[in-house]
Image (cartoon, rainbow, N blue to C red):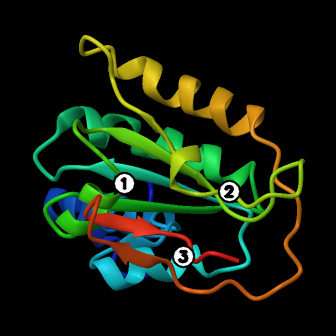
Amino acid sequence: RFSCGSSGSAAQNPRARVQSAMAVRLSRRLLSATLPAIKDFAEYEAIKTSKAQMMVGYFTGHWSTASKMYKEQFEAMAKSYPKYSFYTCDIDDAPLAAYDAEVTEVPSVVIQPLGLKPDGSYYDKTDMVVVAPELAKFDQVLPKAKAVVDSIEVLDDEGERQPWQFDPATGTTLPPHK
């Protein structure tokens, strides 16, 4: 007979077993939440001034089943790119960030290179790539995003990055002119 500690309550009491299983699930969920979750536009903008070579965002909706299904795969992808800044963003929590990133569907992955191009010029908003599901093929979003990330070459930028500036013509932000 299995005994759990002095009382053995988890082995004998079905309620204790359920509570124990729920605690394990909750701790697993908390441990897997390693990526920063953008909650407002200021947090989103702060990533653009970081030393990261690229910002890669997973835009979701709390109501989206597909977003929930592929979140763990996005987190696994993030672990293979330590020089890049990966984050998640619920479009309802930070709608301005979603608008600035030109997100029209969820889940979408937005890739914005930061720093210098191989020719020495700076990456800007025109270099941003939005990978969205085509014809509800949600399973293809992350493989396509990985291919895009792998295809972009970013050189290290020695200087300090300045905040991006609001552009009234487009309603989004653009990097400062150097």
- Residue on which the image places disc 1: 101
Place of residue 130 in the rendered image (x, y in percent of width and height, measured from the top left)? 44, 38
Front one among 160 and 166:
166
Distance Cα–Cα, label 3 vs label 2: 15 Å
Amino acid type indicated by mark 1: Ala
Question: Mark 1 near mark 2, Cβ–Cβ under 8 Å?
Answer: no
Label placed on residue 123: 2
**Which dot, 1 or 2, sits closer to the camera?**
2
Q: Nearer the viewer, residue 159 or 90?
A: 159
User: Can I make out residue 3 in this image?
Assistant: no
- Left or right relative to 163: residue 166: left
106 or 155, which lies in front? 155
Q: Amino acid at mark 3?
A: Ile
In this picture, residue 83 sits left or right of residue 10: right
Q: Secondary structure at mark 1?
A: loop
Q: Which residue is mark 3?
A: 47
Q: Kindly report which numbered mark, 3 or 2, lies closer to the viewer in this rendering.
A: 2
Q: Position of residue 172 (x, y in %)?
A: 32, 64
Q: What residue appears at the point 15 percent right and 53 percent down from the top-left corner?
A: 62
Comparing labels 3 and 1, the label whose residue is closer to the camera: 1
Q: Earlier in the sequence, mark 3 or mark 1?
A: 3
Q: Find numbered disc 3 in the image and state the secondary structure of the residue it sits on.
A: helix
How far from the left and from the top, in percent, is residue 171? 25, 64
Above-or-below relation of 34 to 11: below
Quadrant for the C terminus in the image? bottom right
**Which residue shows up at 45% across the image and 18% down it?**
140
Q: Amino acid at mark 2?
A: Tyr
Q: CA distance from mark 3 to mark 1?
A: 13 Å
Q: Residue at x 32, y 16 (%)?
A: 134
Q: Earlier in the sequence, mark 3 or mark 2?
A: 3
